[in-house]
Amino acid sequence: MAVLEVKDISKSFDEEQIINHISIELHEGEIVSLLGVSGGGKTTLFNIIAGLSLPDEGSVWIDNEDVTGKPGNVSYMLQKDLLLPYRTILDNVALPLMIRGMKKKEAREKAAPYFAEFGLDGTEKKYPAQLSGGMKQRAALLRTYLFSKKVALLDEPFSALDMLTKQSMHEWYLDVMEKIKLSTLFITHDIDEAVLLSDRIYLLTGKPGEITKEIAIRELKSRTQDFKLTEEFLQYKKEILNHLSGEETI
Amino acid sequence: MLPSPIQVIEALIMEFPILIQHSVITLTEAFIGLLAGISLGFLAAVLMDQFDGLYKALYPLMVLTQTIPTVAIAPLLVLWFGYEMAPKVILIVITTFFPIAVGLLNGFKSADKDSMNMLRAMGAGRWQIFRHIKFPGAMSEFFAGVRIAASYAVVGAVISEWLGGFKGLGVYMTRVKQAFSFDKMFAVIFLISVISLLLMKGVDFLQKKCMPWEKEN
């Protein structure tokens, strides 16, 4: 069953079309990547799915309900962790619960048990400035998860991290996803990241941005970094690279 | 005409009981005025932040009030409100209101757009965005404003006491000046400086208590 359906979305700014007839489907428990170059309309699409801006055409559906232009249904996470510097990690993570009207104490009690699962033990009472970049992104993902266990929208969540941290975050991410099975739309410009983490990949190319290819990654779900060294991985990567260079029109 | 430091200290010790009595009056005025100024400044900043029309209408006026010299309106306030506490408190409110309102407004306006969008995407309303992002984000600006306002409050109280009153450090000042007791004059100036400094330290202390995340960095 599709948890998230993006139907035929187009959007222009100042007479310039940014994205053109984009349709995406995300099934329950799936991790789907949207891969494309920077400035290709990924963020525009992202804001539309999050309900922060309206499309010119098309609609966004969650659980068969039209949520076009309605915020509060999809949670998202960005490259910037957006943790509030004046709140402890526990209070940052519990924020979405409080926004939904839960009392502070109750929200904290509800958020606390997830810290172990997300590898955040012992950070509850710390402030964001005391945490490393990787740990901050972990907290940001937990906040995203606590907001909505249905659909998460991740916009280049690991691209600000250095290579080694990024690698360990990928392992951590696959591990956590195994446990929480959060349906995720993952926006990225990193081909390796997309192949490693997703079940399916949409390629967004051209100007205006269109989805020109869809690739299913048929490997086993329990992947590790080793997957990146296999023949299959390289095959996927080649397929994507070929498609991207073939599509290049600018 | 210029007393030695020793004479000043002697005067300070001699006059201390009387100075304390006057200080209590001056400080009471300063506190009431400061509290009212902070409350009003806060209210104005919140309203001007939430309603853009109000911001455009009031902000230039607010700046204009700051160009009027305090010493010029103080005598008018005495004429209108008498010699008791009212004109002093009003003068302090006028002078402290501005740094608070402007500081807070800047803080509110510079709130992080991405964080606000994130809260909106979570379904937060205007008030929740204010409570979780804008208000806590403006705390350092707020305290910077309070620190300035605290020293303005003491000075404002003294100036308005010069121009008419029965008790207070400003009244004491005019009296010793008329008696040409310059040692006492310097003693009271010294005392006012100390009070202002202590108040500012108090604000710093409050800020540390209210913003525990700052010291952790």
Image (cartoon, coloured by chain):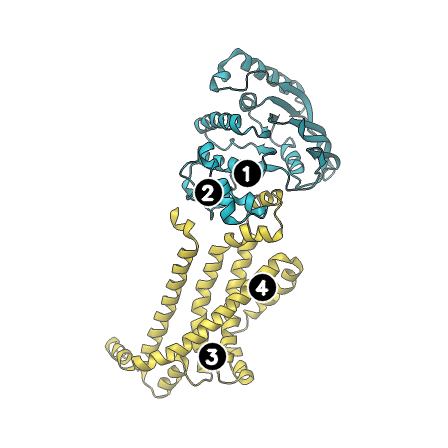
Chain colours: A cyan, B yellow
- Reading the image, the residue beneath label 4 is B44
Chain containing the residue with disc 2: A
Percent position of residue A136, x then y: 47, 37
Tell me if mark 4 has few (under 14), some (14-19) or many (20+) residues whose alpha carbon lies within 10 angstroms of its own: many
Instruction: Tell me whether marks 4 and 3 sit on the same chain.
Output: yes
Percent position of residue B217, x then y: 39, 46
Counting residues from the N terminus, which is met first, the one under dot 4 or under dot 3? 4
Q: Residue at x 65, y 58 (%)?
A: B51
- Reading the image, the residue beneath label 2 is A89
Percent position of residue A104, x then y: 51, 49
The three-letter code of the residue at mark 4 reads Ala
CA separation in Å, label 3 and label 1: 57 Å
CA separation in Å, label 4 and label 3: 25 Å
The outermost residue toward the left is B6
Q: Quadrant of the N terminus of chain B?
A: bottom left
- Reading the image, the residue beneath label 3 is B160
Asked whether the residues under the numbered discs 3 and 1 touch, taking CB atoms below 8 Å apart as contact, a structural biologist would say no
Residue depth check, mark 3 versus mark 2: number of the one nearer the observer: 2
- Reading the image, the residue beneath label 1 is A146
Chain containing the residue with disc 1: A
Asked whether the residues under the numbered discs 4 and 3 touch, taking CB atoms below 8 Å apart as contact, a structural biologist would say no
Disc number for residue A81 = none
CA separation in Å, label 4 and label 1: 36 Å
Q: How many marks overall?
A: 4
CA separation in Å, label 3 and label 2: 49 Å
Residue depth check, mark 2 versus mark 4: number of the one nearer the observer: 2
Residue depth check, mark 1 versus mark 2: number of the one nearer the observer: 1
The three-letter code of the residue at mark 2 reads Ile
State the image quarter where residue B182 is shown. bottom left
Asked whether the residues under the numbered discs 4 and 1 touch, taking CB atoms below 8 Å apart as contact, a structural biologist would say no
Counting residues from the N terminus, which is met first, the one under dot 1 or under dot 2? 2
CA separation in Å, label 1 and label 2: 13 Å
